[in-house]
Amino acid sequence: MVAPTVKLNNGYHIPIVGLGTWKSKPGEVKQAVVDAIAAGYRHIDCAFIYGNEEEVGAGIKEKIDDGTVTRDDLFVTSKVWNTFHSFAKVEEAIRQSLKHLGLDYLDLYLIHWPLGYQENTELFPKDADGKFIYSDLDYLETWKGLEHCAKLGLTKSIGVSNFNSVQLQRILDNATVKPVVNQVECHPYLNNSKLIQFCKDRDIVVTAYSPLGSPDRPWAKPGDPVIFEDPKLKELAQKYNRSAVQIILRFQTQRGVVVIPKSVTKDRIVHNLNCTDFDLSEEDMKYIESFDCNGRVCALDWVKDHPHYPFSVEF
């Protein structure tokens, strides 16, 4: 099956289910992309910092070359990393991603985080004490860089990721081109309802990253809760004759939120796509909303003192 799409504020459409590639290891991600496109995925979510865009590109090329899809059938996203926040660096970064992916253009380019790191060093610049070295660049300058890339035809749409409502409003107040997407962490333990409503009111689509709570995140500790093992969700899964994973993904897609679950396992890739052909009752949607416990797993606590740290306001 091919996932339904959501219309963006510039007229383009984004498939509501995409393949996430964060933490997909080299040697695995090319096959994951091949399997995903064969299964019906048309949306691939990438980022420069994931370090696997060349393999993603090889997977895309294989499925274009064998006639399964054309480039126009696909929706490919990438993101500008924190060490490329100055105006000139944004174009340099997108051109690097395009080269890695083997593409002439992206469908969507995002500011990965509102916070900038020192440029022209390494991707995770740290001082002698192991503390991140920040830049004082304003993300409004980064946004101008994205607008410039859109003007050059390097990307069809532009947006942000990990922006709170205050930061997003500031972009809207200063933008020439309106962001189409805000990609944020979102799952039943962090349902982000207020931010989603804020974005909907401004015709901005929300994409949920880590929609399954990212149990394989590098900093996960033994004993951390795993969302899809929650007995309440397993009970719901039984009721609908689905898996807990499909219930979690349907919770998002039913409220118009795009999901990008990551997997490199063929069966799971197919399984994750099949989450839009049933409906949860209004009562069960509200029930899942009640699981929220502000359970953010990507809090980036180690950069909390950055002036543009996004998680120090309510939403």
Image: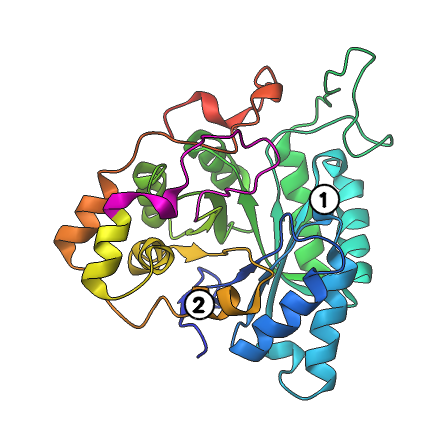
Residue 256 falls within the magenta-colored stretch: no
Q: Say which residue label 1 marks.
A: 49
Which one is nearer the viewer's eye here, 27 or 116? Answer: 27
Write down the region rendered in magenta: 212-232
Q: Say which residue label 2 marks.
A: 271
- Farthest bottom residue in view: 67
Label 1 element class: helix
> Residue drawn at (45%, 42%), measured in percent from left and top?
213
- Farthest right residue in view: 121
10 Å crowding of disc 2: few (<14), some (14-19), many (20+)? some
Q: Quadrant of residue 272?
A: bottom left
Q: Is residue 147 above or below residue 315?
A: below
Image coordinates of residue 136 in percent, x first then y, are 70, 21
What is the C-alpha distance between the residues marked 2 and 1? 27 Å
> Residue drawn at (49%, 46%), measured in percent from left and top?
210
Q: Is residue 285 above or below residue 170?
A: below
